[in-house]
Image: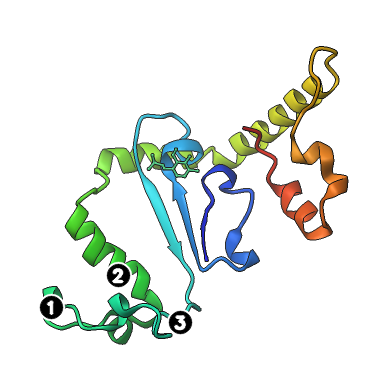
Amino acid sequence: MIVDNTSTVDLVKPAEYGADIVVDSATKFLGGHGTSLGGLIVTGDEFDWANGKFPKFTKTDPTYNGLSYTEAFNELTYIIKARGNFLRDVGPSLSPFNAFLILQGIETLSLRMKQHNENALEVAKFLDNHDSVSWVNYLVLNMILLTNSRKNILKEAMVLY
Ligand SMILES: Cc1ncc(COP(=O)(O)O)c(C=O)c1O
């Protein structure tokens, strides 16, 4: 299971809920400034890429002298394939300066995400109590409809779009 954790980065850890691969766009909250395009792929080490459903990972790759990714890299299969194959063929590569800018953003990530959540909740409550607003669709305000496990995830991630 691949989870895009872009909007709940630092708030929810999808791997703890069963995700095998987590992707994040660093262009949004991670960077926080909009100066740099970038992204992250985080892979776990438990998924069995040799389960017969992924021939592109198991069969030999003639562009790497007959290498089989699963045989050569075990739990690193996906990330090596992503770098050695997809990155090589498609080409996007983060410049050192953009990496530096994204790292600068990450230094304040946890503070910003906490504040985003507090702001989002205030906006939702304000709209929910406003006479001219007929309904607000914001899960945290409607927690009663959710199962306990979802409530626990939502306490960590309340960013409002
Ligand atoms: C949730 C989410 N994931 C990924 C992306 C892709 O991000 P990027 O433009 O950095 O490739 C976007 C872009 O809008 C997004 O909203």
Q: Residue at x 39, y 40 (%)?
A: 102
Q: Which one is earlier in the sequence, the residue at label 2 or at label 1?
A: 1
Among the 4 quarters of the image, the one containing residue 87: bottom left
Q: Which one is earlier in the sequence, the residue at label 3 or at label 1?
A: 3
Disc 1 residue type?
Pro
Disc 3 residue type?
Asp
Disc 2 residue type?
Ile
Among the 4 quarters of the image, the one containing residue 137: top right
Q: Which one is earlier in the sequence, the residue at label 3 or at label 2?
A: 3
Crowd tier of the residue under label 1, counting other residues whose Cα lies within 10 Å: few below 14, some 14–19, many 20 or above: few
Residue that lies at the very extreme toward the right in this rendered image: 144
- Image location of residue 66, percent across then percent down: 15, 83
Q: Residue at x 41, y 38 (%)?
A: 27
- Image location of residue 105, percent across then percent down: 46, 37
Q: Is residue 143 above or below residue 2?
A: above
Secondary structure state at the residue bearing disc 2: helix
Q: Is residue 35 above or below residue 134?
A: below
The image's mark for residue 48 is 3
Task: State the residue position of label 1.
Answer: 62
The image's mark for residue 154 is none
Asked if disc 1 is less than 8 Å from ligand 1, the answer is: no
Q: Is residue 15 left or right of residue 58?
A: right
Mark 3 vs 2: CB contact within 8 A = no
Crowd tier of the residue under label 2, counting other residues whose Cα lies within 10 Å: few below 14, some 14–19, many 20 or above: some
Task: State the residue position of label 2.
Answer: 80
